[in-house]
Image: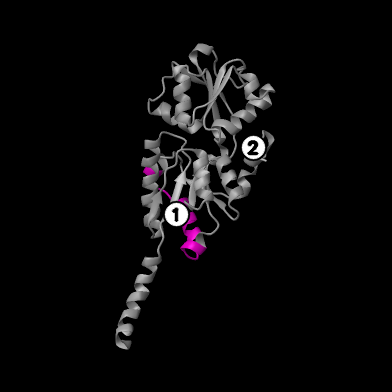
Amino acid sequence: MKLLRKYLAPLLIVLAPAAMAETFTFTAIPDEDESQLRTRFEKVANYLEAQLGVEVKYVPVKSYSAAVTAFRNNQVQLAWFGGLSGVQARRLVPGSEAIAQGYEDQFFKSYFIAHHSTGLDRSANFPAIGGYTFTFGSKDSTSGRLMPQFFLERNLGKRPEDLFKRVGFSGDHSRTVAQVEAGVYQVGAVNYKVWDSMVEAGKVDTSKVKVVWESPVYPDYQWTVRGDLDTRFGDGFKAKVTQALLEMKDPDLLASFPRQSFVPADNEDFQPVEDVAKAIGLID
């Protein structure tokens, strides 16, 4: 028996880490069509798996709030959040940190778009859109709801329900574009990246819908991790995740976001988002 244990011991040492290994899971807010998101983030999962040396799985969710809930419940350890959803998640999970953002996310912006029937044209001045029908994106979207509502209230002095004939929430930026193009709503607010990508891909009929106003810039999307990564996956794992994201250089991967690169981020970068959310009553 002693001889057997002598020969088995080294084998058990080798097998133990593999037996204890966990799957590293991540999610992302569903800001675009689900098929596009799955294609994008399954590529990211493959990249992270190669960089981290553990199994990595992308977990799709149906809503922004579901992404926050998955993060809170430790169903995922990493998430690609918008500015507001990241703030919400980090408030719910003490110790969680924003670790990286797209280069462009340091100075993100929203577009206000309008159906051709409104007769509105692009202007540097905030458009006179009171009295129309209006759609935001998701209720928890930074670029499709939070900041557009802030700019509406700051420039027109009223809350959306007091400004428009009807207010809607499309659910994501792609649907906002589609609904305004179809005339379901006359005006809407959309993530500029999604709009530009859809126009470039020929998915927008710009004879029916156009940009009428471009917002000032603000911080937005970021990668956020739970604070217990090193406890769960081993010392230095959070640093490895951060490094892998910052060193994501594959043009195909970056183009799917689309971002030119990822840069360091921390929680303080998103204080302006939290301040706006408090100012308009979306968080306490």
Judging from the image, the colouring scheme is one colour
What residue does disc 1 label? 244
Magenta region, residue range: 231-253
Q: Main secondary structure of the magenta part?
A: helix
> Which badge, 1 or 2, is on the more N-terminal residue?
1
1 vs 2, front mark: 2
Query: Which residue occupies 47% across, 65% down?
Result: 234
For the question of whether residue 250 can be seen, the reply is: no
What residue does disc 2 label? 277
Q: 152 and 198: which one is in front? A: 152
Quick check: marks 1 and 2 in contact, CB under 8 Å?
no
| Above or below for 236 versus 125 | below
Residue 36 point in image, percent of width and height = 38, 37
For the question of whether residue 188 can be seen, the reply is: yes
Q: Quadrant of the N terminus?
A: bottom left
Query: Which residue occupies 62% across, 24% down?
Result: 160
What's the amino acid at mark 2? Ala
